[in-house]
Amino acid sequence: MKAVKRIAGSTAAFIKKIWMQKQGRIGLILLTLLALVAVFAPLIAPYDPYDVAQRADKGLAPSLEHPLGTSITTGQDVFSMLIYGTRVSLLVGLITGISIALLGSVLGVAAGYLGGITDMLLMRIVDVMIVIPTLPLTILITNVFGKSYVVIVLVFVLFGWTGLARTVRSLVLRLKNADYVKSAELAGAGRWYIMKTHILPSVSHLVIMSTALSCAGIMIAEAGLSFLGLGNPTAISWGKMLAEAQSGGSMLFGQWWTIIAPGIGIFISVFAFMRIGLAIEGILNPGMKGKNGMNKLIKHMGNRYLDEVLSSMEDAE
Amino acid sequence: MSVFSIKNLKVAFPTPRGIVRAVEGIDLSIGAGECLALVGESGCGKSVTSLAALKLLDTSSCIVRTDEHLLLDEDISKMSEREMEGIRGRKASMIFQDALSALNPVMSVGKQLDEVFMLHFGLKRREAKARSIEALRSVGIEDPEARYKAFPHELSGGMRQRVLIAMAFASNPALIIADEPTTALDVTVQKQVLALLSKLQAENGTALLLISHDLSVVCSMADRIAVMYSGRIVECAETWELISNPLHPYTKGLMDAVVRLDEPKGRFTQIPGSLPDPVNKPKGCCFFPRCAHASNKCGEAMPRLENAGNAHFVRCCMSGGAYEG
Amino acid sequence: MKANSTSNMDRHAPLVKTNGLCVRFPLKKESPFSKRRYVNAVSNVSIEIFKGEAFALVGESGCGKTTLADATLGFVAPTAGEVFFNGEKLDIRNKKRLRQQRRSMQKIFQDPASSMNPRFTVARAVAEPLMIRMELDEKLILSKAAEAVESVGLSAGDLDRLVSEFSGGQQQRIAIARALVSGAEYIVCDEPVSALDVSVHAQILNLLMDIRRERGLTYLFISHNLASVRKFADRLAIMYLGRIVEYGDAEKVFANPMHPYTRMLIDSVLSLDGGKIASASQLQTGAVDADASIPDAPFDGGCLLRNRCPLKKKECESIECRLEPVDDEHFTACPYYKTR
């Protein structure tokens, strides 16, 4: 339990570090806003898009009553759909992202640290998973098990953990052979101690970054699958909004808002996760960040800054 | 006539803690066939100097100033990166400490040598191969035809360094900069690699700038030695003159740090303390805090680098120099 | 039995003793059908390290000196032979007992930057061996860490700084403090200065020397710099391709090196007044640089050094090299030492 507490503590400290960066702060703020929108969707949305009684005429243009118009096929309020859609997209993204992170890191650490037969077995599975074409298989699975987000999440997790597991494994292998791990073993440390003090803290940063990036990827993939009609047909998601707009011929009738609205939703959420991912990358590779920082510093301060450096050199004469 | 000369080189790195003054006004000049060594502790600015000499410093993260920067009488201070690419490898090349990371791991060493010949002499692959094998033989690699096909990780550390030396000499450059060429090697191999470097340098009349933290390595190679401390040259003289008549206390300390084989068992002679913080350098002589012979005045003004006769330059007032300003 | 003024060595009691120790590692198979090949990293090594002495192990990289040292720490399983610590056999399979025995052992690594977790503060890095034992309460551990840090010449104020903020020399001091805090009596110093600047060597080696004298520690000092070994060590073993080729009292070996390999190592020490290297025409010894690769065959007879040896004879192809006494504290594996 103490180890869990420590990892939680280090994660909290890490989120603070992300917050300290401009990139990360933008991402965190956007993500919090999205989460609030998702949780309080019924309070924010002017209509309940699931309520058939609240439907208006189909394909209305934006107006005060319907800020983003109404959908072309069902006459639902697009703005309300957008807000309710946050729920599905964010939930699918986060649940899948976090499940992948857990599965990938646990299996990666197991393969790397235990080695031997565990490692061989897991890596062969990874090799097989990587060559399987995911999209056709997903279509097949949803056809067999029914169109639902549970199935989509499971499929994403099933195929998503391999990449992370490989990266984690190679990191663990490197850490395992570090002199400081040997030194701790020499001092009598057991496997569990080395795992929790020397390996997991380093791995956790990598995992957080990959979670942020994979959440973004999965939200796009979810939109894609919904667009193909593989999502839950009764739920409202951004992908499904796009699909309906397309099948209803929005472009044909010039009703651009039905396409732009879900697009903006997808863009904002992916943008938020990407910002966080970039911020973490900056933390993990300070060299890259430093260089950009320096460029900005010079640009910002211009000649005055150069003068200061040069005069400090003259002083030294 | 000097092949390479740089005057009043200054390099500064802005960091969040403040400005790191890595190099504070260094003059170097190397003649054809001459070997000049730059000696000092890590952090004294010697590697930065070597990188600045071929304009390899990333100018987006540091500021470099020179009054004069000549290679073969050409002013390279104003040259663009593009023009410098034509100079590096052709007129001046570099030998790094870590041969394994300086070589391409997925290409055989022979192919890498071929590239140099094809690039600089416009040779065809087959002609280049003949030259490469010849070059491998000239750096003392036995059975060069077989080694031609070897990948870097298949060779021993000494072999890899030899390959790197072959590549550096391949285009017969006027200047070679060797940054700690033997630090990563075993002592038994070190001497042979140094001898090889020395031999090739003499044969080709190359100007060699040798960078090292070990005075004993430098003594076996260099014609002249410049001792660097905290971004400045504190002493510079011909090798024999410097060794037999060291004037700066830091040079004496470095000489004592080289353990002689005939020393009896017992304590080692040590230089107390460590390099000053490059952000907050002390006032006055940079060696003042560690110097056993310092007077009060040394803590106030920086001594000038002055000629003590015999082309022996020293930056120390207690050895007959004068303060700056 | 000679009383040594600079150390409190006790020649009666070997702290570490190896007996016909062999360690071999399997190589990767070239094809599934080929026979598995092995590297004999350590072959048939019998040495004794006495309580309170500084024992030096000298050789080129890849000669097996680190493997031998790791075997004395119970870190590498011997293929044959045995290791005794304080008279008791080290049994790698008995993890519990090994853990207890390791309490009196420590290792100082070559590269201090990688031997301590860069995320750790000095306090945590130094105190880690005690934290792992979980016997003392945190306050006591911290005070012990502070004490150790001060004994290596750093200040207690440095305890809260990150290990990665320090220079190489200071990091090696921290590594020494870490080795001291656990109260080890046997410390393997694996090339403790070769990653550092020459100007820092003296500081670290002096520190190690002082600590040994104050605390009566025993060192296994791995190095390839013979000049430092001469100043530092009481006894030594010269190792070549997994075998000991010369062994004994350091003074005697240096005064009268018997094995050609020892002489090669001595010759390779650079001096300040040696003059320019090319003029000394040291280039002819090209064969000496031949790659030192460890033969995988079981002992095939013949001297392993024969391809590099400047004094090679015909008989060297077939002789069996065993350590033979030159006198009671000096052994060499070259049978022709008498004729030179």
Image (tube, grey):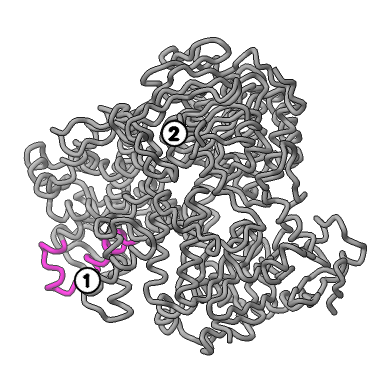
**What percent of the width, then of the height, locates residue A245?**
16, 63
Residue B10, relative to residue A267: is it above or below? Answer: below
Residue B121 is drawn in which quadrant? bottom left
Query: Type of residue at label 1?
Result: Trp
Asked whether residue A25 is in view, the answer is no
Between the residue at mark 2 and the residue at mark 1, the CA separation in whole angstroms equals 73 Å
Q: In the displayed structure, does residue C314 sit left or right of residue C336?
A: left
Q: In the image, is residue C163 above or below residue B11?
A: above
The C terminus of chain A lies in quadrant: bottom right
Figure check: A238 above or below B24: above
Side of A25 relative to A56 (left or right) = right
Q: Position of residue C39 (x, y in %)?
A: 33, 33
Does residue C24 lie above or below A304 as drawn?
above
Q: Nearer the viewer, residue C30 or C231?
A: C231
C6 displayed left or right of C299: right
For image coordinates 17% across by 51% down, the residue present is A225
Between circles 2 and 1, the one closer to the viewer is: 2
What residue is disc 1 on? A256
The numbered mark at residue C64 is 2
Give how far across and how far down residue B284 sits, in percent: 83, 67
- Tell me how many marks there are: 2
How many residues crowd mark 1 within 10 Å: few (<14), some (14–19), many (20+)?
some
Q: Residue at x 12, y 54 (%)?
A: A228
| Percent x, y of residue A77 | 25, 59
* CA neighbours of label 2 inside 10 A, class few (<14), some (14 to 19), many (20+): many
Dominant SS type (magenta): helix
- Chain for numbered disc 2: C
Report the span colored magenta.
A245-267
| Label 1 secondary element | loop
Q: Quadrant of residue A105?
A: top left
